[in-house]
Image (cartoon, coloured by chain):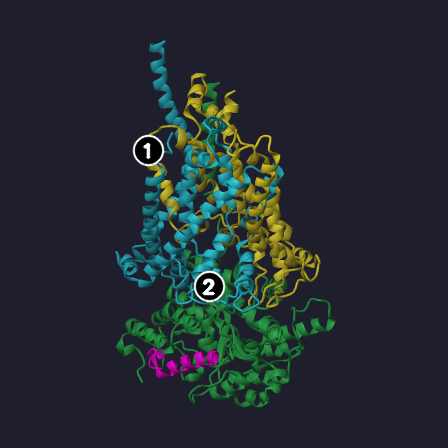
Chain colours: A yellow, B cyan, C green
């Protein structure tokens, strides 16, 4: 039935196996989660300057002052969150749509120049960001003249090679016969994409959505470069203003980091049903 | 029938090509503008002594300087060591965790996935503060407390060239698997259960199923994670930048950091561009090998 | 149906592509005043870090007051954190479109001058403006013949001591503040500051932040007191090949080997050592900045209030400014940081009127009330006449002894060296980053000997500057 034996009729064996698994998972989870735990815990501390970071495992104090401090710190705190939301959502939607289209074309449709084009895309991915940054900045600011707009924040990320590659790898394993059947039944390529490929790729598209959203949400440097007024900044840019010369407002920074992580949690849990449902080819066939 | 099908088929093929170009059109336009154009600019700059006003062409000087620079090669070696130590291990860890999560009840699955995914959600800068504390060199540092339980003496984790690279690797091992785990899980859920059914009928055990069904089916995913992981690892510099600044004695200087410094600290933009292109060539070479060994069965 | 879908898809794809392209239009750049009419409307942009804790909060007031003074001008301030603003500025400079004004350290000026993107204001600034500044700090804003901005302050890099511990160790801190000390006196003093029991040290004599790139500060501060106030001698030879350099390296090692400094020194960062100072784990710390007195006082009050907001485990501390010791009988020279407002130009030559407006804004920011407020906030001295006048009405609670000690040190400030050519300076910076700092980290971590580091620096210097370009003694 599945990868794991069901241990039919032996509930004890199954429980023991799952118990062992859970213990292993918890042990590793503790190591992974610790920095996050520390982040959230320290966000409940006092909004004091660090040098000052109170390094202790357990909270010495519980106050929401740091959250208040974060929102009071700048009248634009909410605006930063909103900007991030607009940018990340647009980038997410456009990536899921265009990357899945392109991924489908690259994996399932034969056309002239397919391999060459795809190789070029992959190679471009290998050029480090540090050198393309200045030409890109010149393009957006000096040539297009769109600094400090949503377009400047969104356009370069509309569809990434990473996502095209991800979509291609997944769609490659969808059996060709289904597509052939659809064609014989008279579907055109867009219909195939829409009616067959999309439903079959729900899982990976959900993954792509959350990864893209998160990536866009966490990007700091590009929005920092192309914005120059507080009202156009994203949350990550705003957050960095907490870092001062020799001191850091430690707890409010952690509060900000916690706040900025929240939308990701929400997105994660609202998409999780797609992560968990295996979309099987058989189910569609029948 | 046969006569009718023929022209229809030809038209379909031509039509399919048009569809394909339409499907990739937006991606290509975005790519051409925001990736290809900057890359071509960087390529031109790599032959220049770049200045905002009045760049001069210097031929292959930047490349020659790069090949002669012993620090560049040292940082390439550091990067390769870091990549070899982190990327495969991360893949194995993520794969193992994804497999372990699979049989659990839905609620538990979600919980664990969330837990493992969390570190990816938090900002790197906030987390680096925590890691600095974990690696605190004084006896009250977390790792130092931990190893003192086993009678090992105090270590100067990030401050000594003997342990600094290991500390960065350890940090990679203990964090940042979230993305790979959920990608692996997505792939695992996509495996057609009829394969397992067939294997069950043959009396295959867990490890046989793992070896003959799961691992081959996940090959495209593994290839994807491997290639993007290596690319990411070669370009990474944030960890080294925030945690050690490349020290001590350049033991954690990564190529990414060097390129960054050349571009911005010393304003030797041409040299930075040349180094990036050399780096890209190295990554391309490694990726080629990966595709050769892993990519064969990917096409269906 | 089939056809319609295909058309629909193509239309969609094309329209998306077009949307991407239409962004090319964009709006014009209203930055520079086209006319040379000095009364034409103009906007000046400034990229400013949090110079002091309250600095960024005052931006709105600064902008308002500026427009009140010059009704045709608007000052547009963009805030950024210290490390980020350097990166942003560098990207903008490389792209040929920097802001008109940025606040940076004077040591950064030369690379922008070299790129041709710094604006020489020597002939634009009026004599009244220039005469307002103390000569020492103003020199730091010069490179070759040009003047590229106005200084905001000159900060001494000193050491900071815990007064109670100093007295317990029998150190006459007042005398040290007035007359300075030699390295040998310093070495004995910090030995006495160490408290240890059964091989475990609970308090060190001296802790300096040397993790990562901060190690550069440590060596830089010490080396100035060993006859090398700059990386280049007066006749432009590279100084760090001198024998004195090796002696200082040996002394750095000696302090750690004495047990007066922790052996984990190489990974102690600025936050950590300040924490150690407040929690009584060290008697003296460095580098010490004037504003630390304020931070210490703030923490003392929190301890008194006992509301759990003070640094965990901290004790009341009277912060005491101490000078850096002098080496080998050389004169004590204080390391100073001069930061200020620097003027930039874009790819296109700015109009005369715009240049003058930029200088007006520069001077507005770097003098009078704005400068006085910021410098008071930082506990640093005023360096303009107008600033001193404005500061008269602003009370500052500062320890009188500390204030006097800083003033003494300022008298011995290392002089500016506008005569060093940008090319030499660039080589020296690269040598520092790629050889000196990494080797110094290894030296502090106890992985190499002082002689090995000295040899490495010497051979790198010879290959960078030639046999004749370095000091031989």
Residues at marks 1 and 2, common chain? no
Q: Residues within 10 Å of mark 2 (few under 14, many from 20)?
A: many
Q: Quadrant of residue A250?
A: bottom right
Image height of B55 relative to C108, above or below: above
Chain on which label 1 sits? A
Is C77 or B60 nearer to us in this picture? B60
Image: magenta residue range:
C234-257
Residue A91 drawn above or below residue C447: above
Which quarter of the image is occupied by the C terminus of chain C?
bottom left
Q: CA distance from mark 1 to mark 2?
A: 45 Å
Report how many numbered discs are placed on residues in the image.
2
Contact check, label 1 and label 2, Cβ < 8 Å: no
Where does the image place residue C170, in percent across and percent down from the top left? 59, 89
Residue in the image at 48% along x and 61% along y: B243
Which element is circle 1 on?
A: loop
Answer whether residue C236 is magenta in the image: yes
Q: Which mark is residue B18?
A: none
The secondary element bearing badge 2 is classed as loop
Q: Which mark is residue A113?
A: 1
């Amino acid at each position: 039935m599945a990868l794991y034996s069901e241990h039919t009729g032996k509930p004890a064996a199954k429980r023991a196996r799952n118990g062992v698994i859970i213990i292993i998972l918890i042990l590793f989870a503790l190591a992974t989660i610790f920095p996050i735990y520390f982040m959230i815990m320290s966000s409940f501390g006092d909004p004091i300057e660090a040098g000052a970071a109170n390094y202790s495992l357990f909270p010495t104090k519980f106050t929401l002052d740091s959250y208040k401090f974060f929102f009071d710190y700048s009248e634009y705190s909410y605006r930063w969150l909103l900007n991030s939301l607009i940018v990340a959502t647009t980038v997410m939607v456009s990536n899921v749509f265009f990357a899945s289209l392109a991924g489908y074309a690259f994996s399932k449709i034969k056309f002239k120049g397919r391999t060459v084009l795809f190789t070029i895309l992959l190679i471009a991915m290998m050029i480090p960001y540090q050198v393309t940054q200045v030409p890109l900045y010149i393009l957006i600011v000096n040539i297009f003249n769109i600094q400090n707009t949503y377009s400047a924040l969104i356009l370069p990320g509309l569809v990434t090679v990473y996502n095209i590659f991800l979509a291609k790898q997944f769609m490659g394993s969808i059996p060709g016969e289904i597509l052939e059947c659809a064609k014989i039944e008279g579907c055109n390529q867009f219909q195939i994409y829409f009616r067959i490929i999309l439903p079959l790729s729900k899982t990976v598209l959900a993954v792509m959505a959350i990864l893209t959203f998160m990536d866009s949400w966490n990007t700091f440097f590009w929005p920092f470069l192309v914005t120059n007024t507080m009202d156009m900044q994203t949350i990550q840019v705003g957050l960095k203003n907490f870092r001062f010369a020799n001191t850091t407002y430690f707890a409010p920074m952690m509060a900000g980091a916690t706040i900025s992580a929240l939308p990701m949690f929400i997105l994660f849990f609202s998409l999780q049903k797609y992560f968990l449902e295996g979309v099987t080819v058989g189910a569609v066939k029948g | 029938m046969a006569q009718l099908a023929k022209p229809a088929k030809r038209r379909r093929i031509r039509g399919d090509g048009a569809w394909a170009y339409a499907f990739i059109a937006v991606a290509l336009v975005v790519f051409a503008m925001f990736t290809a154009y900057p890359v071509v600019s960087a390529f031109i700059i790599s032959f220049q002594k770049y200045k905002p006003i009045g760049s001069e062409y210097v031929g292959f000087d930047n490349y020659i300087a790069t090949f002669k620079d012993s620090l560049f090669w040292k940082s390439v070696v550091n990067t390769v060591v870091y990549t070899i130590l982190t990327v495969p291990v991360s893949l194995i860890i993520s794969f193992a965790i994804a497999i372990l999560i699979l049989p659990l009840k839905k609620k538990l699955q979600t919980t664990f996935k969330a837990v493992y995914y969390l570190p990816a959600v938090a900002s790197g800068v906030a987390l680096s503060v925590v890691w600095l504390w974990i690696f605190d060199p004084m006896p009250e540092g977390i790792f130092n407390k931990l190893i003192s339980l086993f009678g090992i003496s105090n270590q100067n984790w990030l401050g000594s060239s003997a342990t600094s690279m290991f500390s960065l690797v350890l940090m990679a091992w203990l964090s940042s698997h979230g993305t790979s785990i959920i990608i692996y899980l997505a792939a695992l859920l996509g495996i057609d259960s009829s394969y397992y059914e067939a294997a069950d009928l043959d009396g295959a055990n867990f490890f046989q199923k793992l070896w003959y069904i799961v691992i081959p089916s996940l090959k495209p995913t593994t290839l994807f994670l491997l290639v993007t992981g290596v690319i990411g690892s070669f370009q990474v510099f944030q960890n080294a930048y925030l945690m050690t600044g490349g020290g001590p004695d350049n033991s954690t200087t990564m190529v990414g950091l060097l390129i960054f410094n050349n571009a911005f600290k010393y304003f030797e933009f041409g040299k930075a561009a040349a180094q990036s292109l050399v780096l890209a060539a190295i990554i391309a070479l490694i990726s080629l090998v990966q595709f050769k060994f892993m990519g064969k069965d990917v096409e269906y | 149906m089939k056809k319609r879908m295909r058309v629909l898809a193509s239309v969609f794809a094309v329209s998306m592509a077009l949307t991407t392209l239409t962004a090319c239009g964009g709006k014009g750049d209203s930055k520079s005043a086209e006319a040379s009419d000095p009364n034409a409307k103009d906007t000046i942009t400034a990229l400013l870090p949090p110079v002091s804790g309250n600095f960024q909060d005052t931006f709105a007031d600064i902008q308002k007051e500026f427009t009140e003074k010059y009704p045709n001008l608007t000052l547009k301030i963009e805030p950024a954190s210290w490390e980020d603003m350097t990166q942003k500025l560098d990207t903008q400079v490389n792209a040929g479109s920097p802001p008109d004004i940025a606040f940076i350290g004077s040591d950064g000026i030369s690379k922008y001058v070299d790129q041709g993107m710094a604006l020489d204001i020597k002939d634009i600034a009026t004599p009244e403006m220039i005469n307002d500044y103390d000569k020492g700090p103003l020199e730091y804003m010069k490179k070759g013949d040009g003047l590229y901005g106005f200084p905001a302050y000159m900060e001494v890099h000193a050491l900071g001591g815990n007064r109670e511990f100093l007295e317990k160790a029998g150190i006459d801190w007042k005398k040290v503040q007035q007359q300075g000390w030699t390295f040998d006196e310093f070495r004995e003093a910090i030995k006495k500051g160490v408290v240890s029991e059964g091989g475990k040290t609970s308090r060190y004599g001296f802790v300096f932040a040397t993790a990562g790139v901060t190690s550069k500060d440590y060596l830089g501060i010490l080396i100035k007191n060993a006859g090398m106030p700059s990386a280049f001698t007066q006749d432009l030879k590279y100084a760090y090949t001198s024998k004195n350099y090796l002696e200082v390296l040996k002394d750095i090692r000696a302090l750690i080997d004495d047990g007066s400094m922790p052996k984990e020194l190489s990974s102690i960062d600025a936050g950590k050592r300040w924490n150690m100072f407040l929690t009584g784990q060290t008697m003296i710390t460095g580098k010490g900045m004037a504003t630390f007195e304020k931070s210490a006082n703030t923490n003392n009050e929190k301890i008194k209030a006992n509301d759990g907001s003070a640094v965990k485990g901290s004790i009341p501390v009277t912060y005491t400014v101490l000078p850096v010791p002098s080496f080998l009988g050389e004169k004590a020279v204080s390391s100073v940081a001069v930061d200020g407002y620097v003027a930039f130009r874009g790819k296109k030559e700015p109009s005369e009127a715009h240049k003058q407006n930029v200088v007006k804004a520069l001077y507005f920011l770097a003098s009078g009330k704005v400068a006085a407020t910021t410098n008071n906030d930082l506990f640093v001295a005023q360096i303009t006449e107008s600033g001193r006048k404005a500061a008269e009405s602003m009370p500052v609670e500062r320890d009188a002894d500390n204030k006097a000690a800083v003033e003494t040190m300022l008298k011995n400030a290392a002089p500016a060296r506008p005569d060093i050519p940008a090319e030499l300076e660039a080589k020296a910076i690269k040598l520092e980053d790629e050889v000196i700092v990494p080797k110094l980290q290894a030296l502090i971590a106890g992985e190499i000997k002082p002689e090995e580091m000295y040899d490495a620096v010497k051979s790198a210097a010879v290959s960078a500057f030639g046999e004749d370009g370095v000091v031989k003694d």
